Amino acid sequence: MTAPNVTITDLTVTFRRGQVRALDGISLRLPTGMVGLLGPNGAGKTTFMRVLTGVLLPTSGSVAVDGTELTSRSQRREVKATTGYLPQELGLYPDLTARQFLDYMALLKGITDRRARRARVKEVLELVSLSDVANRKVKGYSGGMKRRVGIAQAILNDPRLLIVDEPTVGLDPEERLRFRSLLARLAGDRTVLLSTHIVDDIVQTCPNVVVIEHGHVAFQGAIGALATRAEGKVWHVTQPATAPPPGLPTVNVTPSMTGTTYRVISSGTPAPDAERVSATVEDGYIALMHGTAPERAQHGPGLRVI
Ligand SMILES: Nc1ncnc2c1ncn2[C@@H]1O[C@H](COP(=O)(O)OP(=O)(O)OP(=O)(O)O)[C@@H](O)[C@H]1O
């Protein structure tokens, strides 16, 4: 398999006869491997993923995987062949076993030959490490196991582009870790787009990240470059009061021996005894969202505006 070429060109989606502009002229080329998708609520991430999965036709612009357009009505079938999707809420049939469920999904995805279907289901069960429990009913599975069934159905067609929406919500730390490494393993030479509000999931698995805000690309590039955006501007301010220093974006708050320590973003020294600390990806993201990071939407090594 050669590296997929996912090209998004001037993608615009409007709702309510143009009154709501959910995506506003997004142009991106996604690299192979894991790509994080970040953005505040209402930024346009779900709309973006719905277009990539062929659920929603854009108002204008296009998405192509390896030159195959996914955004024209006539090519919906191609979408099924080239993309996989794990939505936030995937309806599983609790009384089916994982094997039965996957067999059914494979049929829906057009694998009509029984033998081929059985072989592919066996393969994906192995990939997600569920072979041993494949004949148990899904209703007895843990949250992490259900999520792995979800991934298994998303990769039945060996997609070039795999889209995963908030996959680790509600998982315990061990399951989260396991799920993250599964995604990283699956990325290989395909593109896996991981949308989440958990910045740490992205830090741990994605070399590249896209940040969407108000329907625009606010940042795209290497994950480290996002952290760099806040370098020199992250401070620990400890004060006895329970209120944060006014007017500054606060990344987190920790109780300390001498009061409360606020991690804030500020271009200048925020308080006389403030301590400057090195920036993390989360700091970079918060700085970007509050307009305190320079040069938004700059090119990065893995991703580029086209
Ligand atoms: N079907 C729709 N009709 C009208 N407006 C919509 C529709 N779908 C989305 N929107 C609007 O488009 C914008 C982007 O929504 P979207 O759901 O894509 O954001 P999001 O980044 O996924 O948010 P969240 O993180 O909360 O899921 C929002 O202003 C939303 O209200």
Image (cartoon, rainbow, N blue to C red):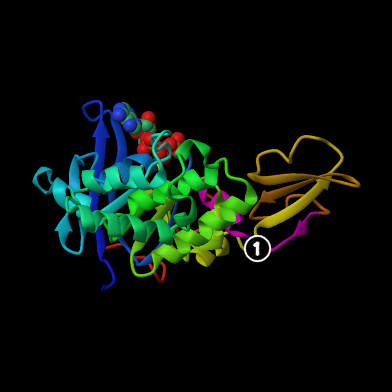
Q: Position of residue 35 (x, y in %)?
A: 42, 59
Horizontal arrangement in the rendering, residue 90 relative to residue 229 (left or right): left
Chain part drawn in magenta: 274-290
Residue at 65% across / 52% down in the picture?
266
Above or below, 135 against 122 in this view is: above
Q: Which residue is mark 1?
A: 232
Q: Position of residue 205 (x, y in %)?
A: 51, 62
Residue at 55% across / 42% down in the picture?
142
Circle 1 — which element?
A: loop
Please say whether residue 65 is one of the residues in the magenta stretch. Answer: no
Bin the neighbour count of mark 1 within 10 Å (Cα to Cα): few under 14, some 14-19, many 20 and up. Answer: some
For the C terminus, the quadrant is bottom left
Q: Position of residue 48 (x, y in %)?
A: 32, 45
Q: Position of residue 290 (x, y in %)?
A: 54, 45
Q: Quadrant of residue 297?
A: bottom left
Nearer to us in this view, 46 or 94: 94
Nearer to us in this view, 225 or 90: 90
